Amino acid sequence: MFTVEWLPMTTTRHRERTELLQGTLDMLILRTLILGPAHGHEIAKHIQRTSDEVLRLEHGSLYPALHRLERKGWLASKWDAHREHNRECKYYRLTAAGRKQLAAAESKWERLQQAIARVMAAAARA
Amino acid sequence: MTDHHDLDRELRSHLENEADEQRDRGLSAEDARYAARRALGSATLIKEDVRALSPWAAIDDAAQDVRYGLRLLKKHPGFAIVAALTLALGVGATTTIFSVVHAVLLRPLPYADADRLAMVWENVNLPQYTNAQNAPAPGNFRDWREGNSTFIDMAAARDGAWSLTDSGDPIRVAGEMVSGSLFRLLQVEAALGRTFTPDEDRGSPSVVLLGHGLWADRFGSDPAIVGQTIHLNDEPYTVVGVMPRGFRFPDPDDELWMPLGLTPDQLANHGSHFLRVVGRLKPGVTIAQAQAELDTVAARLAKQYPQTNAGVVGVTVISLPEQIVGDVRRPLLVLLGVVGFLLLMVCANIGNLLLARASARGREFALRAALGASRTRLLRQLLAESLLLAIVGGALGLAIAWWGMAALRWLAPADLPRLDNIALNGWVAAFNAAIALAAGVICGVMPALHSQRRDLHGALKDENRASAAGVRLRARNLLVVVETALGVVVLVGAGLLLRSFVRLSQVPLGFKPDGVLTFRVVLPAARYRTEPQRTAFYRQFLDRLHALPGVQSAAAITSVPLAATGRITGVSMEGQPAMAPGDVRLVRLVDFRTVSPGYFSAMSIPLIAGRDVAWSDTNTTEPSIVVSETMARTFWPGQNAVGKRVKAGAPDNQTVPWLTVVGVVGDVRLVDLIRTPRPAMYVPASQDRATGDVLRDWIVRLSGDPTAIVPSVRSAVWSVDPTLPVTRVQTMNHAKSASTASQQFTLLLVGTFAALALILAAVGLYGVTAYNVSQRTRELGIRVALGARRATLLRLVLAHGAKLTLIGLAIGMAAALALTQVMSTLLFGVGVRDPMTFVGVAVLLLAVSLVASFVPARRATRVDPVIALRTEN
C-alpha cells in the first residue's frame, strides 16, 4: 500500500480524507455564500471563524471544490476589485441551482444529524 | 490555457490576502508571505486537482505520460531496442502461427452453410483391414441416398486425371467425375456458362466444366470457350462452363469436372470402392442423427449383400470442415500452444528487463511520489511506457509476421489445406495488436505493482536499498524459474518431434532412393486399347530410356512407393475353405501393383526367391505374380511360396484366374513411411487382362545427378508419342522427403521456437546472475578480503544460477509430462514420455544455463576488495 507515515503531515494532503469531507465542504461553501458573494480567502476565513476555529479549512482543498461547484453550475464567479486593497479578487456567488442544492444538502444534513443524535442519546441512556 | 491563468491569478490573490492578514497580526512582510504559502499548501497540487476536473485532463495526462515515456526510451536506446525486438519476435511468431490457424481452422469454407455439408464414408472392419473412411462403392452410394431421410441430397465424385492436348504442350489435368447434382448441393454456380443438367448425369455425354485457373492459364480467360470443343485423353468434350475462381472440389488440385454418369450396372455394384460422397443435411439434423440412420441402412445392406458388404459395418459421417482440416487441427494447435509459451517467455524476459530498470529508477519514483505524484499517476506513467513498448513491439511484430507468413506459404507442405488463405487480414492484425498490448500491460504492470510496495522514504534516503533490491531479486528469480520451466516444455516438445523425425527417416524403405528419378506418363485408353499396343509402347519407351546417357536401369509401376495412393484387393489362397456368405474371417487384403520387368532391380528391391516378371508373361501364358516377403510369410508360413496360387476375390469365383507365384521380393513401404508393410503382390504389365491397369510411374536409376536427365526424358517420351504429358517429375529422395513434409514442417517451426526459447532462457539467467553479482559486489569483496578463494566465489554465484535452473527444470519437466500427451498423434516411434528426450533436454538446458551464468559469474571472481568495499552498493 501507498502510505504517507514517513512524511510530515503538514506537507501532505490526504486525498482519501478530502474525499470523505467533500460533501460537507461543498455544503459549507454554499452556506457561506448565501450571505453574499465572497472570494476564496473570505470563504476560508468565514468557515474557520464561524466554527470557532474548529474547522481549520485547508486552503489548498478549497479551490478544487470551488471550481467543481462552479462546473456543476451551483456557483458563478466574477473578477472584481477587492473591497479594501487595490487588487482584483475572484468573487463567487450562489446561483439559483446552488440555492436549491444547498436546501437539499441542508435537509439531508439535518436528518442525518438528528439520527446520529438519537443514536448517541440512546447509547448514553443504556 | 486561460483557465490555468485564471487559477494562478486567483491563488496569487489568495496568498496576498492571507499575507495581508498575517502582517496585520504583526508578522514581518517576509514571514507573512511564507506563512501564507504554508497555509495554502502546494500550488502545483491545487492546480493539478483543478485541472483534473476538466474532461480533457485524462487525455492531457496521457499525452504527457507518452511524451515522457518517449523521452525515456530515447534516453535508454539499448533497453528500448532490446525490449522492443524481443517483444516483436514473440508477437511476430505468435501472429504468424495465428494467421495459419485463422486461415485453416477459423475461416469459414466458401460454401453456403458449409457446416451442413458432410462427407459420407464406408466404415470397414475386416480382420486385416480397418478403415473408417473407406471410399464408398456406387451401390452403397445409391442405397444410402435412397434410404435416408436426414439428407437433402447426396452427390458422388470420382477422382481422375486427363491429358489435355489443345493449345500447347500436352499437360495432365486433375479433375473429377461428379454427380450432376453436386453443384446444386454445394450451392455453387458457374462463373461462365452453366453447370451440368440432370440429363447429363445419365449416360456419359462429353461435356466438361473448367476450373478458373485452367481457363486462365490454358485458354487465356477466353469467354468464348463456352461451347467450344477441347480434347481430353484424345476424346472431344464440349465446354459447358467455367467455375468461379478458387472453386476446387473435392481435391484442392481439381481443375475440371465432367458428369459421373453411373450406369445401372455400376449402381448395382457394392464391391468396387472408388467414390467420394458428399451430402447436405436437412435443417436441424445433426451429424450423429445422420450417422445413426445410415448405420442402420449399412447394417441392412450387409445382410442383403453379404459377399461384398459384410466388412462394411457402418458409415462415417463427418462434416466437411472437419474433413478438410481435421487432420491438421492438432498440429496447428500444438504450434499455437508452443508459440504461446514462447510469448510468455518473452514477457518474462521483458519483465526482467523492466525490473532491472526499476531498480535504477527507484529514486526517481520516490522523488516523484514525494513531490505529490499519486499512486495511480505513477502506475499510469509506467503503463504508458510499457504501452509505448507494446506499440513499437507490436508494429515490428506485424512486420515479422508478414515476413513469417510469406515464409510459411513457401515452407508449408502442399497437403496443408487452405494454404492460400493465409493472409495479413483484419483478424490477424487485430490479434497482433491484442497480444502486443496484453504483453505490454503484463510486462508493465509487474514492475509497476512492484514499485508501489517500496518504502519511498527509505528509497529517497538510500537506506533501504538492500531490502528493496532483495525483493527485486526475488521477483527476478521467480521470472527466471518460470521462464526456464516454459522453455523446458517447448524444448521437450521439439525434442520429441526431432526424435520422431529421426525415427521416421531411419525407417527401412525396402528400396534405395539414391540416384532414382521418377515421372508419370499415362497412356490414353482411347489410343492404346489393347495389351499389345500398350506393351509395344512400354518396351519401346523403356529402350529409349535405357539408351540415355548415365541411365543404369529403367522400369515402371502403377504407382510409385510413398505416393500415398495405390490399390488394395482381397485375395484367397488355393486350398483354403470356401467362405460362407458374410464370413469375413478369411478375407485377405493385399497391396496390389502392376510392374514392368526390371522394376525390382531398378529400385534395388532384393529378389529373395524365384524370378522377376518378364515380357514373356502375357495374357496367353499362365498368370504370374511376384509377392512380397510379408505376403509369402503370412500366406504360406514355413513353406516355399514359389509355385503357390492365389486369386482375387472368393476361392470359388470361377470368373477370375488363379495367379501363380513366380518370385518373392523384399518388403517395401508402398503407401507411406508410417504404415508397416502389408502383404503385397506385383502383376506383370503384359498380363493386364484381369486388372486393366496401365503403367503410369516411370523410374530411371542413374549414376549421376538424376535431375540432369529431365530434358532428355521428355524428348524420349515425345519421340515415342508427342501427345503424352510428362508430370510429377521428381527424384525418389524428394518423394521420400515429400512424404514426411508435414512432419518436417512442424519440426522446423517447433525447432525454431525451441531455439528461441533456449536463447530467451539463457538471456534471462544471464541477466539475473549479472544482477545478483552486481548486488553482491560488497559481500563478495568482504569474502575476498577475509581470504575466500576465487573458486569458492565462482561456486557461490554459479550455485545461485544452478538452483534457479534446477527448480525451473523440475517444474518444466512436470509440466511437460502433463502436456506432451496432446502430441501423441504427432509422434512416430517415440513415446510422449520418451526418457531420452527428457534427459537430453535436461542436459542441454543445464549446459546452456551454466554458460549463461558463468559469464557474469566470472566477474564476481575479479572483484577487487578495496574497490568493492569503497563503493556504496
Image (cartoon, rainbow, N blue to C red):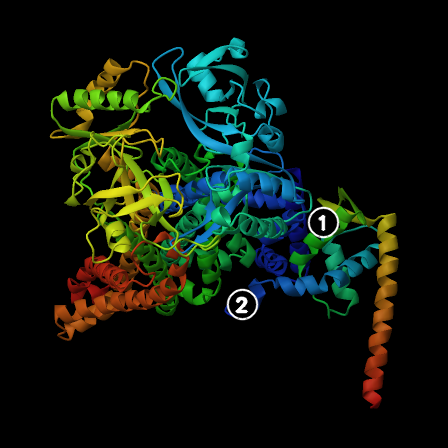
Of badges 1 and 2, nearer the viewer stands 2
Residue picked out by circle 2: A3
Q: Which disc, if any, is residue B730?
A: none
Residue at the extreme bottom of the image, as rendered = A126
Report whether B782 appears left or right of B337.
Answer: left
Q: Is residue B753 left or right of residue A60?
A: left
**How would you rate the neighbour count of disc 2 (Cα within 10 Å): few for under 14, some for 14-19, many for 20 or more?**
few
Above or below B611: residue B847: below
User: What amino acid type should be assigned to the residue bearing mark 1?
Assistant: His
Q: Position of residue B64 (x, y in %)?
A: 52, 43
Q: Say which of B560 and B502 sits in front.
A: B560
Locate the C terminus of chain B by quadrant.
bottom left
Q: Nearer the viewer, residue B210 or B860?
A: B210
Q: Are marks 1 and 2 in contact (CB under 8 Å)?
A: no
In the shown orientation, is residue B766 left or right of residue B380? left
Which residue is nearer to you in this view: B117 or B662? Answer: B662
Q: Residue A107's image quarter?
A: bottom right
Which residue is disc 1 drawn over?
Answer: A67
The answer to whether any part of residue B677 appears in the image is yes
- Mark 2 is on which residue type? Thr
| Crowd band around label 1 with a 10 angstrom C-alpha radius: few (<14), some (14–19), many (20+) | many
Report helix, strand or loop for mark 1: helix
From what the image shows, is residue A106 above or below residue B218? below
Q: Tell me which numbered mark, 1 or 2, is placed earlier along the sequence.
A: 2
Q: Is residue B710 visible?
A: no
User: In the rendered image, which quarter is residue B610 located in?
Assistant: top left
- Residue B497, given in percent of the width and then of the height, sits at 31, 52
Q: Tell me whether marks 1 and 2 sit on the same chain.
A: yes
| Chain for disc number 2 | A
| Horizontal and vertical percent position of residue A86 | 71, 44
